[in-house]
Amino acid sequence: MSATAQDHIGFKLCLSDINRGIFLPKYYNPEITGRLQALRKTHNLALLGELIEKNYVSVSAGDEIGKMAYGTGSIPFIRTSDISNWEIKTDAKQGVSEEIYEDYAKKQDVKVGDILFVRDGTYLIGQIALVTSNDLPFLYQSHILKLRVLPKSPISASLLMASLSSPIVKRQIRCKQFTADIIDTIGDRYKELALPIPKEIKVAEKITKEVDDLISERARLCDKIRTIPYWVEGLINSPDDNISAELIPETSEKGNIGFMRKFSSITNGIFIPKYYDPLLKEKLKILSKTHTLVSIAELVKNKIISWGTGIEIGKMAYGTGSIPFIRTSDISNWELKGDPKQAVSAEIYESNKQDVQAGDIFVVRDGTYLVGTSCILTDRDTKILYCGGLYKFRVENTDEIDPYLLLALLNSPIVRRQMRAKQFTRDIIDTLGKRIFEVILPIPKDADLRKQIASKTRQVITTRVQLRDRTKEIAIEVEGVDSLPLEETEIIETA
């Protein structure tokens, strides 16, 4: 005898049906069982564990390299929060040296076409990314699994990506994850995931081709996100140029080796050496020849831009609906995540409604390595609430500065280095606080260049957001439905 009731609210289960001593009710959600049974008419249900056993897919976990390795170089160390929207962040939180990379590279053996799957991390569990040539080289942590589709596999990596993103798989992941020590994980239960693979060959081929094309185009545009900030600063002549290793700012938090400063020049009682880094001052002096240097405070004072901060709605509001509540970790590669961690009900949204519109820019104020991360909102992103750890900047005078130019400026190397120098620890979290208004923006003096930068940035963001939203549609289509009813969307988020 199996589940006898109709839904997750209540059902009966025989003791003999208990699997591996698991007494967690949501693990046996009869709605998922029913949905999988219905899918058998149109889909082959492939257990991920069976694909692994048959050598169609290989799986391996990353490594913990230790915090002492963080900041020793510029080779990314990918962590769970560096994966979203089917891709890896361009500015991973941590970087390691070539020596440390070589110690782990052979064992990790990452290749183009591999899929990274978040195994541990509560709301991040199930996030996936397909590795592209632009992502390499990197190392990845132990909380992430690397799936590789092997030559004899009956399904492609792209089809596996789409299937892993389908609503029924997302629901299975939420029901199978559990708390181990202080972190949620799916453990080895990922092997129990039943993947819906369309029986209709033409449908499977169509999905595979579209995923291939989509990931390729988003990766191409993501490369522009890497180069535009260097173009802004005049370090390269075009966003199509390559960035040489010498141009990549050092990611180490060691600061300047040594310098002297008069006591009378100490600002606001701040005695943090990196705050006064003379190398930044020298760099800004050089940039003044080709750029107009303007602080964010000046732009606010002159009413060119306005600013605000978000709100905290409380954890009891999480998961009550489908309207995104944007947090600091929901920003990746200049855009919002397609599936933010938390969502709220329409009632909570209406009672806490914030002034948000297309063209607004979010900048992370609080959060250690996330500080300074930014994105711009499009028409698709405005029905949201956002947290207090974010600054919202709005261009009030577009004749003076284009919002997309402002986004590019905020991500230029010299600006990101200033933000690193100005952030500080308050209580238990790092923050920029009001020091963000001290940050100097290097605005190119060449008017044509300013227009080119704004236009290119707008094109990149607009296209990538359209493709981001298409990934969500594909994930639904692979399951054979056109859309999900609101109540089912909410169940996926809260199960």
Image: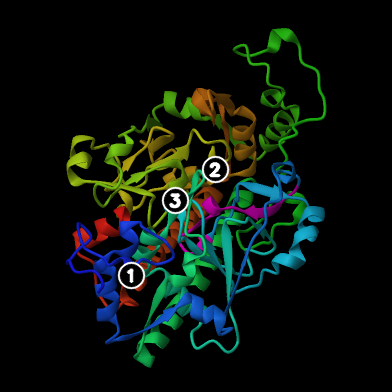
Q: Residues within 10 Å of mark 3 (few under 14, many from 20)?
A: some
Q: What type is the residue that disc 2 sits on? A: Leu
Which numbered disc, 2 or 3, marks the residue that appears first in the sequence? 3
In front: mark 2 or mark 3?
Answer: 3
Q: Nearer the viewer, residue 300 or 44?
A: 44
Q: Amino acid at mark 3?
A: Thr
Residue 205: x and y in percent read 42, 87
> Of circles 3 and 1, which is in front?
1
- Asked if the stretch drawn in magenta spans residue 129, the answer is no
Please tell me the numbered disc located at residue 409. Answer: 2
> Disc 1 and disc 2: Cα gap in Å?
59 Å
Residue 90 occupies quadrant: bottom right
Spatial distance from mark 2 to mark 3, Cα to Cα?
34 Å
Residue 483 in sight here: yes
Q: Quadrant of the C terminus?
A: bottom left
The reply, left or right, for residue 397 in relation to residue 365 is left
Residue 412 coordinates in the image, percent (x, y): 60, 44
Q: Earlier in the sequence, mark 3 or mark 1?
A: 1
252 or 21: nearer the viewer: 21
Snapshot quadrant of residue 303: top left
Q: Which residues are magenta?
A: 73-87
Report the residue marked by disc 1. Answer: 17
- The type of residue carrying mark 1 is Asp
Residue corresponding to mark 3: 122
Tell me residue 188's x, y (percent).
52, 65
Whether tag 2 and tag 3 are in contact, CB under 8 A, the answer is no
**Residue 74 magenta-highlighted:** yes
Label 1 CA crowd tier, 10 Å (few <14, some 14–19, many 20+): few
Residue with the most extreme front position: 15
The image shows residue 22, relative to residue 251, as above or below, that is below
Q: Secondary structure at mark 3?
A: helix
